[in-house]
Image (spheres, grey):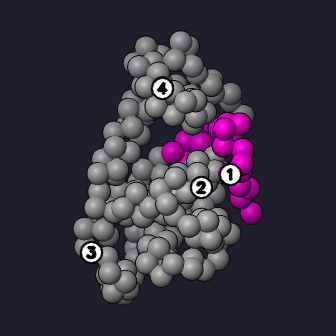
Amino acid sequence: MTQFPLHTPETAPEDARGTLSAVQEKMGFLPNFYAKLATAPAALEAYMTVSDIFGRTSLTPGEQQTVLLTTAVENKCEFCVAAHSGGARQAGVAQDVVDAIRNRSEVPDSRLRALSEFTQTVVRERGEVGDEGVQRFLDAGFTQQNVLEVVLGVSLKTLSNYANHIVETPLNKELASFEWKAA
């Protein structure tokens, strides 16, 4: 396969350098996903912009991470599953919920189960969830706004999941404790 560079703030294209520096400063390390995506500064900017917007949705941080982790599992993105396993825990998602999503088993929290199941359906059916799927999600206490916010989160993760598959992003040592292998 074609080798995509693992950029640093010093080696990245000029338009991506500031972003990589900011990510490294904020996180304390540079996740390899950002280092690879910097090859296309516009793609990195798109990811950062959509990520910021998704962070401002009405979903709680734990719910946002549930959407992102579920999407990554569905798309078999090993890098993103590791990253969002850590992110979910930081956002207060219980370990048994994280484990259930990673293992594709029943999520023990009923609200997060409904969110994860709706997200799975959005990914698997490419948005063709039907009235019944939407109604089940609404019946679980979510809103029409949340329906579209899930689509936003799936869109965000699809960008990163597909990019990671193509560029073969290696897992950072900082994420090694969250390693996950696709079946």
**For residue 166: magenta?**
yes
**Upstream in sequence: badge 4 or badge 2:** 4
- 28 to 149, vertically: above or below: above
Residue contact at pointers 3 and 2, CB within 8 angstroms = no
Residue type at the position of mark 2: Ser
Residue contact at pointers 4 and 2, CB within 8 angstroms = no
Whether residue 84 is visible to the viewer of this picture, yes or no, is no
Q: Which residue is mark 2?
A: 85
Q: Which x, y percent locates residue 120?
A: 51, 70
Which quadrant of the figure contains the C terminus? bottom right
Q: Classify mark 4: residues with Cα within 10 Å, few (<14), some (14-19) or many (20+).
A: few
**Upstream in sequence: badge 2 or badge 1:** 2
Residue type at the position of mark 4: Glu
Q: Classify mark 1: residues with Cα within 10 Å, few (<14), some (14-19) or many (20+).
A: some
Q: Which x, y percent locates residue 136?
A: 38, 85
**Upstream in sequence: badge 3 or badge 2:** 2
Residue type at the position of mark 1: Phe
Which quadrant of the figure contains the N terminus? top right
Q: Classify mark 2: helix, strand or loop.
A: helix
Residue contact at pointers 2 and 1, CB within 8 angstroms = yes
Q: CA distance from mark 1 to mark 4?
A: 21 Å
**Upstream in sequence: badge 3 or badge 4:** 4
Q: Which residue is mark 1?
A: 178
Q: Which residues are magenta?
A: 160-183
Q: Which residue is mark 4?
A: 25
**For residue 97: magenta?**
no
- The number of discs equals 4
Q: Which x, y percent locates residue 79?
A: 63, 46
